[in-house]
Image: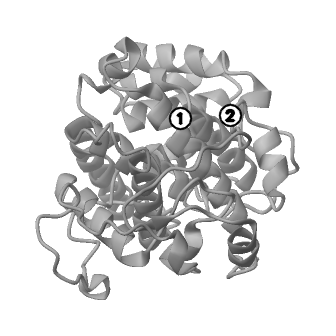
Amino acid sequence: MADNLVCGETSESWIIDNDDEINFGEIDYSKGGNFGSIPMIHDDSQSSSSLREERIIEMLEKEIEFCPGTDYLKRLSSGDLDLRVRNQALDWILKVCAHYHFGHLCISLSMNYLDRFLTSYELPKDKAWAVQLLAVSCLSLAAKMEETDLPQTVDLQVEDPKFVFEAKTIKRMELLVLHTLNWRLQALTPFSFIDYFINKISGFVSDNLIYRSSRFILNTVKAIEFLDFRPSEIAAAAALSVSIDNEKAMSNLIYVKQQERVKRCLNLMRNITEENVPGASLSPQQPRLEARVVVPESPIGVLEATCLSYKSEERTVESCTNSSQSSPDNNNNNCNKRRRKQ
């Protein structure tokens, strides 16, 4: 990072109230609760089945705590919140996750953090770089929670970002996100429920069913209409989408109280065409269990299969706090660093 490209401004009062150094190696990211996807239980004993059912009931009761505010969708739809901010962040997050072969759950967590943050915190409108900094920070936190093979935080800034931030700036923004989310990072997402619902509907869980349903789930991240549904409702709809007999399958969803909402979510999901699903045009690789599917090897293939627009031309040069505009050399260097091992 060239020194002459780093802005002289160092005050980040809107990010953090003090200028203390932060040691993120000592942060306990799990303090928000021990929820993840439900592990598959191969023991068919009654005790194991009972424990599994108790777990799903607990998760259904808690999931609302990890959803954006009730007025978030309305504010996005009305223009009170700028939808372009969310879309811009998502476009970049998808590109980076494809670049490093991060799993679908990392994308889902990143957007969960971003949506919950924007529910409670308004980014400064006079700082064009704030959106990019938020996207980097949310993705960094999600990767720390979910991925095992991580690049350095600054090396996440690939795919020609408009602004490039120093590590200390990203850490300060991470701390603001953590504080705003009350340190609850182990969020319940549709991926937390999908293997359970597939097992309930189909009687078994296969890599193919996980892969197909995961593509439907991932596509809901783009469409803001799905913010109206709970994670379990999206997961149930995705599981129904890959089932043969929907009516019979619906009767197996005994813990879904508002089945009409699931049907509405299912109809909305079916209206999303196949080409809108990230990775839909590619042959599936071996998915990871617990609803974590490896993004296909070609980042270009992933992006061409989406309806996301990401314009890189005609980018303006703007100043930002503790950031630098990226150069082709910087981008090429970052692209060669720490690819995820297959």
User: Which amino acid type is shown beneath numbered disc 2?
Assistant: Leu
Q: Quadrant of the C terminus?
A: bottom right
**186 vs 135, nearest the viewer:** 135
Which residue is label 1 attached to?
87
**319 vs 24, nearest the viewer:** 319
**158 vs 296, nearest the viewer:** 158
Label for residue 308? Answer: 2
Report helix, strand or loop for mark 1: helix
Residue at the spot 69% in from the left edge and 33% down from the top edge = 309
Residue at the spot 27% in from the left edge and 52% down from the top edge = 54
Vertical arrangement, residue 328 with respect to residue 155, above or below: above
**292 vs 209, nearest the viewer:** 292
Measure how far apart labels 1 and 2 are at the Cα level.
Answer: 8 Å
x, y percentage for residue 59? Answer: 29, 48
x, y percentage for residue 316? Answer: 60, 44
Vertical arrangement, residue 304 with respect to residue 141, above or below: above
Q: Earlier in the sequence, mark 1 or mark 2?
A: 1
Left or right: 274 as drawn, with respect to 47: right
Residue at the spot 36% in from the left edge and 56% down from the top edge = 52
- Residue 262 shows in the view: yes
Disc 1 + disc 2, Cβ < 8 Å: yes
User: Number of numbered discs present?
Assistant: 2
Residue at the spot 33% in from the left edge and 54% down from the top edge = 187
User: Which amino acid type is shown beneath numbered disc 1?
Assistant: Asn
Left or right: 305 as drawn, with respect to 110: right
